[in-house]
Image (tube, rainbow, N blue to C red):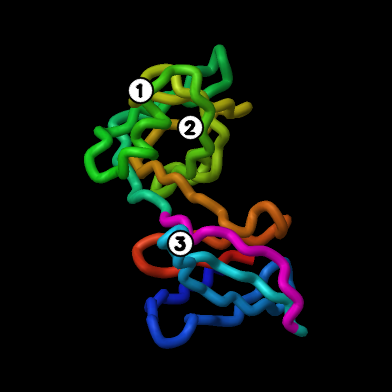
Amino acid sequence: MTTIIPFRPSNIAAPSFSCQLDGQTHKVVVTWNVSSQRYFINVYDSVGVWIITMPLISCPPARPVNSARYDPFLNSVTVEMGSYVGWPTPYAGLATKPGTIIEYTLEGFQPLTYNGKFRSLHIQSLAFTFPMPTDPGPLVVLGRVSRMLNMVGPVFKNSVMIYRNGAFEISP
């Protein structure tokens, strides 16, 4: 189950909240760094021992999908995305070169087999492919493509903390 915690910046006190990461309670304190002019998340364990500090990274908005096709000969899915409109330049720039490998999250597809996180290879600026060992069946509903940037991934094996739409999304 995903916990959503709204982020309300403050110039008076560092916002903080408690959450479950890898099954244990942790405290997250969001601080402003004057030198880099950005927010950082600081994760502490239940007794206050510092674990990790990472920059607060906002995930770009999800993008529409124009088509998704399963290739039974290559056991792979090829996805063609909509335009880069609305994606910040650093994210759009990453996907413009064929041969770039990016981890994408597919959401809102029917059948559900298409949904999930996939390490994908760009074959064109707006098209990528990823392996899928079994045929997912006929596509009923096209979903969207997201870049979920897990800020606690380097330390926590099972938990995910992403930031998008002004809120933290934490999954155990």
Image coordinates for residue 147, horizontal then vertical, percent: 45, 45
**Which residue is tagged 2?**
137
Q: Residues within 10 Å of mark 2 (few under 14, many from 20)?
A: few
Q: Quadrant of the N terminus?
A: bottom right
Q: Is residue 56 magenta?
A: yes
Distance CA(mark 1)–CA(mark 2):
26 Å
Span colored in magenta: 48-58
Q: Amino acid at mark 2?
A: Gly
Residue 48: percent from left, percent from top: 73, 82
The amino acid beneath tag 3 is Tyr
Sequence-wise first label, 1 or 2 = 1
Q: Residue furthest left?
A: 85
Q: Residues within 10 Å of mark 1 (few under 14, many from 20)?
A: some
Residue 165 point in image, percent of width and height:
35, 63
Q: Quadrant of residue 18?
A: bottom right
Up-down: is 82 above or below 14?
A: above
- Mark with earlier residue (1, 3): 1
The quadrant of the rendering that contains the C terminus is bottom right
Can you name the residue that lies furthest to the front here? 35
Image quadrant assignment for residue 20 = bottom right
Residue at (52% x, 59% y) in the render: 55
CB within 8 Å, label 1 to label 2: no
Residue found at the far bottom of this picture? 12
- Helix, strand or loop under label 1: loop
Q: Which residue is mark 1?
A: 125
Taking the magenta stretch, the answer to whether it contains residue 93 is no
Q: Alpha carbon of mark 1 to alpha carbon of mark 3: how far?
A: 26 Å
Q: Which circle marks residue 163 in the picture?
A: 3
Q: Residues within 10 Å of mark 3 (few under 14, many from 20)?
A: many
Residue sitting nearer the eye, 138 or 11: 11
